[in-house]
Structures are given as C-alpha cells and as structure tokens.
Image (cartoon, helix red, strand yellow):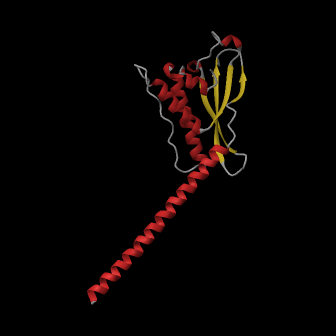
C-alpha cells in the first residue's frame, strides 16, 4: 500500500510540475509575441523619414552629371530620438553628411537621415547585387542588432560610430560605392 501511495503522489507531483512548466512556457511565448507585435506596430506606424534633408549643390563638381560616393567624405554626425505619430514608439534616426570637394572654395553637401533598419536593408541589397560578380568585394559589417530596443545614449553613440565606419568602408571601395543600391541609399541615383 505504501508503494502505491508513493507512486500516486509522485505522479501527482509530476503533473503539477508539467502544468507549471506549461504555464511558464505559455507566459514566455505570449510575452515574446506581444513584444513582436508592439515592435512591428512601432516600425510600420512610423512615418517614412525624408531621406534627403538638404542639398547644397555646386555644379562644377558634378562631372558627367554624376557624383560618386567614393569621392566623398562620409560622416554620421548625429543621432536623434524621434517619436512616431501615435507617440507610443520612439526610434533612433542617424544624420549622414556627405561632402564632395571640401578642399575647394565651394563644395557639394548632402544631409541624409536614416534608421538602422534602412542600413540593414542596404546590406541585403548589396549582397544581392554582388552575388553574380566574379571578383566580389568584401561587404563590411553593420554594428550588431540589439534584441531589445536600446535607446540609451551610450548604445546609440556606439552604433553611430559603427554606422560611420560601415559607410566609410563602403565609400572607400569603388565597387561597392558605385552599386545602384548604394547610390540610391545616399540619393545619387
């Protein structure tokens, strides 16, 4: 009788442990799905940023009606936190300054505003465009993507510097700098 009671008690305890594990798993999965829904809603509800802020043109610098990213100085000069229309989500926006002919009396400058997700889309487009090249250039890496939406100043500054390094490496390689996806990204199409 003692063995049967012990077996029943162990089965009962095992059932309770399984119910608790199932409840915990459900909580984790539902929390993750809620976070994904919120992150997706924040991304899709945001206004598409105006990629071109201003464009100071100096016509003699444009040879053959075409500027090259390879000939420019590239800086990611600023990071700003911007709210979406519904004010429930905040995202980081990076200001990019492209300058041609800085050593001349006059220069050509473009200011762009981009989100990290736009950089990630650029990487995908670059990889797609160079796939068929025989002598494929090395694609620089972006700063790591965070699983959590980190908007603290130290993280954003580190990411800004990483994005600046990424753009500098792209601009330094003529094969990458002249790709249609890159030219479109910086407004030179």
Most extreme residue toward the bottom, as rendered? 1
Q: Is residue 41 left or right of residue 162?
A: right
* Nearer to me, 63 or 26: 26
Q: Note whether 189 is above or below 63 in the view shown.
A: below
Total numbered labels placed on residues in the image: 0
At which x and y percent is residue 155? 57, 46
Q: Residue drawn 40% across and 19% down?
A: 135
Q: Residue drawn 59% across and 35% down?
A: 118
Q: Is residue 13 left or right of residue 50?
A: left
Q: Is residue 2 left or right of residue 33?
A: left
Q: Residue drawn 58% across and 21% down?
A: 69
* Nearer to me, 102 or 160: 160
The C terminus appears in which quarter of the rendering?
top right
The N terminus appears in which quarter of the rendering?
bottom left
At which x and y percent is residue 13? 38, 78
Residue 182: quadrant of the picture: top right
Q: Note whether 161 is above or below 37 in the view shown.
A: above
* Nearer to me, 141 or 185: 185
Residue 56: quadrant of the picture: top right
At which x and y percent is residue 20? 45, 71
At which x and y percent is residue 162? 53, 36
């Amino acid at each position: 009788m003692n063995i049967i009671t012990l077996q029943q008690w162990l089965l009962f305890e095992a059932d309770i442990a399984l119910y608790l594990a199932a409840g915990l798993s459900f909580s984790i999965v539902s929390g993750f799905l809620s976070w994904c829904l919120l992150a997706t809603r924040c991304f899709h509800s945001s206004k598409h940023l105006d990629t071109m802020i201003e464009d100071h043109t100096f016509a003699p610098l444009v040879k053959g009606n075409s500027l090259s990213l390879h000939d420019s100085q590239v800086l990611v000069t600023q990071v700003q936190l911007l709210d979406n229309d519904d004010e429930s989500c905040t995202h980081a926006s990076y200001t990019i300054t492209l300058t041609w002919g800085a050593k001349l009396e006059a220069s050509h400058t473009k200011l762009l505003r981009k989100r990290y997700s736009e950089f990630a889309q650029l990487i995908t487009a670059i990889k797609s465009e160079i796939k068929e090249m025989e002598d494929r250039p090395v694609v620089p890496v972006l700063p790591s993507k965070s699983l959590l939406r980190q908007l603290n100043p130290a993280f954003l500054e580190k990411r800004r510097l990483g994005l600046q390094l990424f753009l500098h490496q792209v601009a330094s390689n003529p094969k990458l700098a002249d790709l249609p996806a890159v030219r479109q990204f910086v407004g030179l199409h």
